[in-house]
């Protein structure tokens, strides 16, 4: 299976996202073809100051996908996912604007002839890959590990079409499929503070504590995420003195472990809160 | 009780304020504000409502009163984290988050964005790097922000060191092959977005 891939700006320097995505895709037969010379989606920053600029940035990504002949763009970041989909919805409803944008992209020899679909890698793993591909290779003891699935905001909101906007299930089901024990909890889509966490750390701390505290109370060994900013905030923003540190691996890292991929090729050493103790359960 | 602070008509009903109000109503979903029933679901759903000088429900009451200067000087849109919780819950289907984006754009345009708030500056740094490199780099963004807010930065040294230790701290920005393409795109202002 071949997909147009939009990695987004944080992908490369994250806590093992790139390493684990590449390793897992190799094993399950997914080919992610990076869009050539892609640009930033603008996230929530560009649209806060300059709406036109924000739509042009994302439109260029669509045009790159068209040029490469992809009818879908796969992302690994919730912010990219929603920024792209936002523009897509607007362009879908306003052909005049699409024409206008195409007129501006033509300087670079680009053109959106068909708006590509936008998909998160979780969706691809869960819906496109045969369920059997994920099972049968898990190390003994995997069911002893309890995982809380954390979706963040911008995967299921604002549209709520991929999954329920407040009580989604897809990541839970995927992690279960891998063989882990998934615990139910009420913080699946609470906000982590996103980019506000950086300048307003003290104001956002309670948000992080709500999520970590809830997972801890429900008996999770770890929280798994699917967004680089959620991962960073939960990993770096924990107040350690409030309880034992909670590792925050990516869903792709958990998938890699379940597929029997050696931990050192999954970038697990890049997590700020290490998973060492839990990894011992695997040996 | 809602709008004690807008009883003074001076800022509320000037011609200019009515123009801003009209412009907001003309953006996508803007008119839905007229259907707001002041139930407060948005304010109760917001993760940072306690930081806002007007909770979203109050802000919409101010918009309807055309107290636009109060609205555009408010820190409310700048504390919006784009979690969209209010938007999926609003019983009148007001696109709250989208309206917050428009209010931020208007506040910048009118020069009324609150000076003391740190988000306009952070967005500026971010957007400038996008225009310069076509991409952003987390650690470079942190560094630039830190130069402006050294006190804030001190509290983040620990995280910075951890990122260094795990080899996730980039000292050079990632760039497009030809970032001028993005600078050129962002300079164009001819588009009309309704």
Image (cartoon, helix red, strand yellow):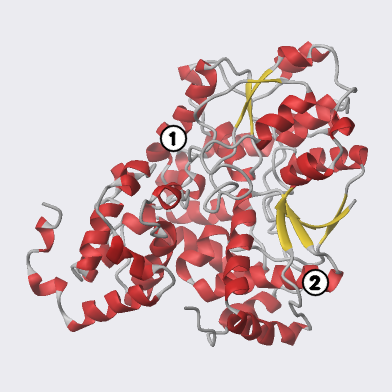
| Parent chain of label 1 | A
Q: Position of residue B174 (x, y in %)?
A: 71, 59
Question: Which of label 2 and label 1 is nearer to you?
Answer: 2
| Parent chain of label 2 | A
Q: Residue placed at 41% from the left, 74% from the top?
A: B27
Q: Residue placed at 46% from the left, 51% from the top?
A: B84
Residue extending farthest to the left is: B8
* Front residue of A53 and B129: A53
Which mark is first along the chain, 1 or 2?
A: 2
**Looking at the picture, does residue A212 appear above or below residue A45?**
above
Task: Name the residue that disc number 1 marks.
Answer: A207
Checking the image for residue A66, the label placed there is: 2
Q: Is residue B69 visible?
A: yes
* Front residue of A267 and A134: A134
Q: Is residue A12 left or right of residue B182?
A: right
Label 1 crowd bin: few (<14), some (14–19), many (20+), radius 10 Å: many
Q: Is residue A141 left or right of residue A218?
A: right
**Residue A281, picture quadrant:** top right
Q: Position of residue B7 (x, y in %)?
A: 7, 64
**Looking at the picture, does residue A188 appear above or below residue B51?**
above
Q: Is residue B132 visible?
A: no
């Amino acid at each position: 299976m071949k997909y147009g891939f939009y990695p987004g700006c944080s992908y490369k320097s994250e806590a093992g996202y790139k390493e684990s995505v590449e390793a897992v895709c190799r094993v399950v037969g997914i080919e992610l073809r990076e869009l050539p010379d892609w640009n930033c989606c603008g996230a929530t920053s560009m649209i806060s100051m300059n709406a036109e600029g924000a739509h042009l940035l994302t439109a260029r990504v669509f045009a790159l996908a068209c040029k490469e002949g992809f009818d879908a763009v796969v992302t690994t970041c919730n912010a990219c996912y929603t920024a792209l989909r936002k523009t897509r919805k607007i362009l879908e409803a306003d052909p005049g604007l699409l024409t206008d944008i195409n007129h501006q992209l033509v300087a670079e020899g680009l053109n959106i002839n068909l708006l590509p679909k936008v998909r998160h890698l979780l969706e691809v793993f869960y819906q496109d890959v045969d369920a059997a591909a994920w099972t049968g290779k898990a190390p003994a003891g995997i069911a002893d590990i309890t995982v809380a699935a954390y979706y963040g905001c911008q995967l299921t909101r604002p549209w709520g079409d991929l999954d329920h906007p407040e009580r989604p299930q897809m990541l839970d089901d995927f992690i279960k499929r891998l063989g882990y024990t998934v615990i139910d909890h009420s913080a699946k889509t609470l906000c982590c503070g996103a980019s506000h966490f950086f300048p307003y750390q003290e104001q956002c701390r309670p948000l992080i504590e709500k999520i970590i505290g809830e997972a801890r109370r429900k008996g999770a060994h770890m929280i798994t995420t699917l967004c680089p900013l959620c991962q960073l905030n939960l990993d770096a923003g924990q107040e350690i003195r409030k309880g034992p540190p909670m590792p925050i691996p990516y869903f792709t890292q958990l998938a890699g472990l379940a597929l029997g991929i050696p931990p050192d090729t999954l970038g697990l050493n890049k997590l700020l809160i290490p998973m060492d103790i839990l990894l011992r359960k695997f040996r | 009780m809602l709008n004690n602070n807008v009883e003074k008509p001076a800022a509320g009903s000037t011609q200019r304020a009515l123009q801003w109000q009209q412009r907001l109503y003309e953006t996508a979903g803007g008119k839905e504000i007229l259907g707001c029933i002041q139930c407060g679901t948005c304010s109760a759903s917001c993760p940072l409502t306690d930081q806002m000088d007007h909770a979203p429900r109050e802000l919409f009451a101010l918009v309807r009163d055309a107290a636009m200067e109060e609205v555009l000087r408010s820190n409310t849109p700048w504390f919006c984290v784009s979690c969209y919780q209010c938007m999926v819950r609003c019983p009148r289907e007001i696109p709250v988050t989208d309206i917050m984006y428009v209010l931020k754009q208007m506040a910048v345009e009118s020069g009324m964005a609150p000076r003391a708030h740190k988000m306009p500056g952070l967005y500026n740094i971010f957007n400038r790097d996008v225009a310069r490199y076509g991409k952003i780099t987390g650690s470079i963004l942190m560094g630039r922000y830190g130069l402006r807010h050294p006190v804030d930065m001190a509290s983040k040294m620990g995280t910075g060191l951890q990122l260094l230790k795990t080899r996730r701290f980039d000292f050079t920005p990632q760039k497009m092959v030809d970032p001028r393409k993005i600078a050129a795109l962002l300079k164009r202002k001819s588009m009309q977005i309704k």
